[in-house]
Amino acid sequence: MTTRQRTTHSAEETMQAGREIAALLRTPLLLILRGDLGAGKTTLTKGIAAGMGAAAEDDVTSPTFTLVHEYPGGTMPLYHLDLYRLQKERELAALGIDELREGAIVLIEWGERFPLLVAEADGEIAIAHCEGDSRTITLTLK
């Protein structure tokens, strides 16, 4: 198991942390993005997408209503999912996460709400809001 931790003090530093994390990621990989509402999960994903060359930071938005955003550019595809609106395991099954995972990086916000998904994940990125704009970001890979 590998764990790395970093504290950021602004949105730009959080995106930079994402760019650094991107350099560590290899496919196939499914990561749970864990953090409270407004913790910076999408901001971190902006940096990861940019670091992978999958999308420009300005092109990355929260997939709250669409559930899945695909960023196919770069060295490998990136899928960004938001499961906040899902309630049941069968809704999760309909997304086809296993197929998305093949040859790609899959980042899932609110995935911790589904224990089966957590068990299948290759790790997680936990974002904890500290004082002001500070965040503690912890990457754990199994």
Image (cartoon, rainbow, N blue to C red):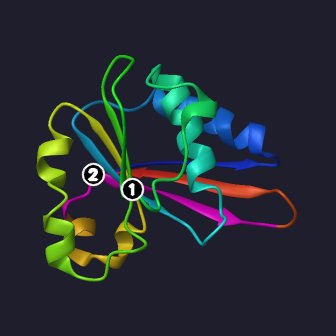
Tag of residue 122: 2
Please give the name of the residue rendered at 67% of the width and 33% of the height, measured from the top-left corner. Answer: 16
Disc 1, SS = loop
Q: Residues within 10 Å of mark 1 (few under 14, many from 20)?
A: few
Residue shown at the point (69%, 43%) measured from the top left: 14
Q: What's the residue type where badge 1 is placed?
A: Thr
Q: Circle 2: is it few (<14), some (14-19), or many (20+) Cα within 10 Å?
A: some
Q: Nearer the viewer, residue 19 or 91?
A: 91
Where does residue 108 sit, x and y in percent of width and height?
38, 56
- Residue annotated with mark 1: 66
Q: Secondary structure at mark 2?
A: loop
Q: Residue at x 63, y 46 (%)?
A: 43
Chief SS of the magenta region? strand
In the rendered structure, the answer to whether residue 23 lies left or right of residue 121 reads right
Question: Is residue 5 in view from this perspective?
Answer: no
Compared with residue 13, is residue 75 higher up or lower down, i.e. above or below? above
At label 2, the amino acid type is Asp
Q: Which residues are magenta?
A: 120-130
Q: Position of residue 80 (x, y in %)?
A: 39, 47
